[in-house]
Amino acid sequence: MNSLRTYISVLMLSVLVSCSQRTTMPQTTSTAPVIIYQAKADYSQYVPVRLSNDGSRIVAYPAPSDVRQGDSYRYPVLLDKGYYWDQQGVSPNTAFLSITYTEYAALETAPNPETLLANILDRTPFLEMYHAGSVGDYRQIELELNKIIAQNRLSELTSLLRRKNN
């Protein structure tokens, strides 16, 4: 039952974020959800966008200023065994653009959704995706996430994918 509540909370967050054409992705705060994933390839340098449920349109994308954090970019954090800890707000409906964070941050304004849709690198990039609680649940988040991975305890987390992509 607790797993279902967690899934519903993450789903509601995804719905709220996708309600507008352009959405600022969540910042890392103590209540920010911890999403870890494994993808078919290394997309860590590419900008994520959120697609509609049917994949026909982009429903959320960052402003160019949203992909930066201070002097660096909001790249996902590489964990053990090829997993990543998301820093940008990915969901099961996320696709990656063929545009890197560096290229995107250099833009004055975000391209229109049609242009972004035409520049999708992969519409179904994820092999696995899990909700691992909130940032505030951890003292040393990267270390603790790697421990979960190393101990093969991902099945204890809430899976956000219905099936594995091929």
Image (cartoon, grey):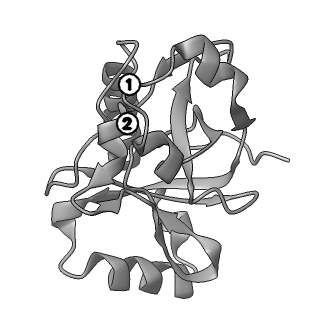
SS at mark 1 in the image: loop
- The foreground one among 146 and 25 is 25
Residue tagged by mark 1? 109
> Which residue corresponds to the image point at 55% horizontal and 18% vertical from the top-left?
58
Q: Position of residue 111 (x, y in %)?
A: 50, 21
Please tell me whether residue 36 is drawn above or below residue 51 in the rendered image: below
- The foreground one among 152 and 73 is 73
Residue tagged by mark 2? 64
Q: Position of residue 22 (x, y in %)?
A: 37, 19
**Which amino acid lies under the numbered mark 1 shown in the image of this protein?**
Thr
Q: Is residue 140 left or right of residue 47?
A: left
Mark 1 is surrounded, within 10 Å at the Cα level, by few (under 14), some (14 to 19) or many (20 or more) other residues, namely few
Quadrant containing the N terminus in the rendered view = top left
SS at mark 2 in the image: helix
Q: Is residue 151 visible?
A: no
Circle 2/circle 1 CB separation < 8 Å: yes
